[in-house]
Structure formats: structure tokens, C-alpha cells
Amino acid sequence: MTDTLNLTQTEIDERVAILKRLRHLLKQQRTKFQEYLLVLEKQEVSIKSDDVNVIYAQAEIEEQIVSNINNLQRVIKPMEDLYRSVYPQGEAEIPQLKTDLYKLQTQVLAQNERNRNLLKNNIVHIRSQIAKLKNPYANRKSIYAVEKHIANYVDIQQ
């Protein structure tokens, strides 16, 4: 406790700056997870309605969001380490943000699993439909491969 009382103003400012930056990054990550969850929920509706173009567009958006989350995570990890070194006893808001992020991540993973299962079911259904289709030309020879008797000579007399 006496350690905290002997801090200089510069050290306090550094701690506050670290705390603010980490809080900001965690809030950004929470926002990205919320966006991702929203895209996944909309994607579920698109999968159920078999709207391929929308599914494709949502997959591209999903890819960008995941990339942003990964980039944020690369920055957050060192900030968390720095935060733990500066605040070994912890702080009230950061654990709450981490809990919110964990809940959102769990929801995202569950929604992603539902979407994957829906897509797998759609693929199985489409494959069975394709297998049921009959090729009308399956038992026929090509009209070009049919042997026709054609005269070799033409008699032209007048």
C-alpha cells in the first residue's frame, strides 16, 4: 500500500494512460465481437432462405471482422501484460470487460457452430438432390456416334 502512495505524478499518468488504452482496446474488441455476432445471426437467416449471394457477402464481411479481431488481439495481449505489471492488484472495470468479451466470444462460437451445421445440412440436401437427377442422355448414344448407312456413290443421270 505504501508503494502506491510513493508514486510520482509521471508514474501515475503512465498507469492511467495504460489503463485507458487497455480499456479502449477491450471496448473495441467487444464492439467487433458484437458486429461479428450480428453478421452470424443474419447469415443464419440467409442460410435458411438459401440466399447464396447474401451468404457470400456476409462471409466476406465475417472474414474482415475476424481479421480485425485478430489484429486487436495482437495489440491487447502486450497491453494486458503491461497492465498486470503496473496494476498487480487489478482494477474494477477491466475484469468486467474481460467477462463481457468471454460471454460474447462464447455466443459467437455457438452461432458459428449453428451456421456450420446448417450449411452442412444444406450441402447434404443439395448432394442428394443432384444424385436424384436423372441424365436423359445416360442410356443413349450421341446422335453423332450413330452409324447410319450412307451411300458411297451418288448416281447422277439425266
Image (tube, rainbow, N blue to C red):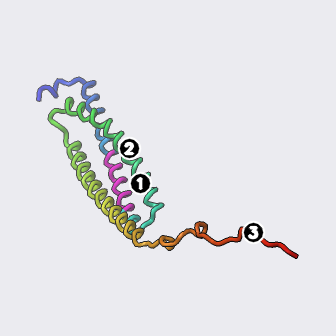
Q: Is residue 64 left or right of residue 149?
A: left
At horizontal 58% and vertical 66% (from top left) the residue drawn is 145
Q: Which of pointers 3 and 1 indicates the residue nearer the eye?
A: 3
Find residue 153 and report its horizontal and vertical position in percent.
75, 69
What crowding class fits label 3: few (fewer than 14 Cα within 10 Å), some (14-19), or many (20 or more)? few
The residue at which mark 2 appears reads as: 67
Start and end of the magenta stretch? 29-43
x and y percent of residue 79 in the render? 28, 34
Q: Amino acid at mark 1?
A: Ala
What residue type is disc 2 on?
Ser
Whether residues under marks 3 and 1 lie with C-beta atoms below 8 angstroms apart, the answer is: no
Mark 2 / mark 3, whichever is N-terminal: 2
What label does residue 127 carry, if any? none
Question: Farthest left residue?
Answer: 1
Comparing 83 with 152, the one in front is 152
Measured in 3D between alpha carbons, the distance from the residue under mark 2 to the one under mark 3, in whole angstroms, is 74 Å
Label located before the other in sequence (2 or 1): 1
Q: Residue at x 23, y 32 (%)?
A: 81
Q: Which residue is mark 1?
A: 59
Q: Residue at x 40, y 49 (%)?
A: 63
* Picture quadrant of residue 21: top left
Predominant secondary structure, magenta span: helix
Q: Is residue 35 left or right of residue 97?
A: right
Query: Badge 3 is on which residue?
Result: 153
> Measured along the vertical axis of the image, is residue 136 above or below residue 35?
below
> For the residue carrying disc 1, how many other residues have a C-alpha within 10 Å: few (<14), some (14-19), or many (20+)?
some
Could you tell which of marks 3 and 1 lies nearer the N-terminus?
1
Q: Secondary structure at mark 2?
A: helix
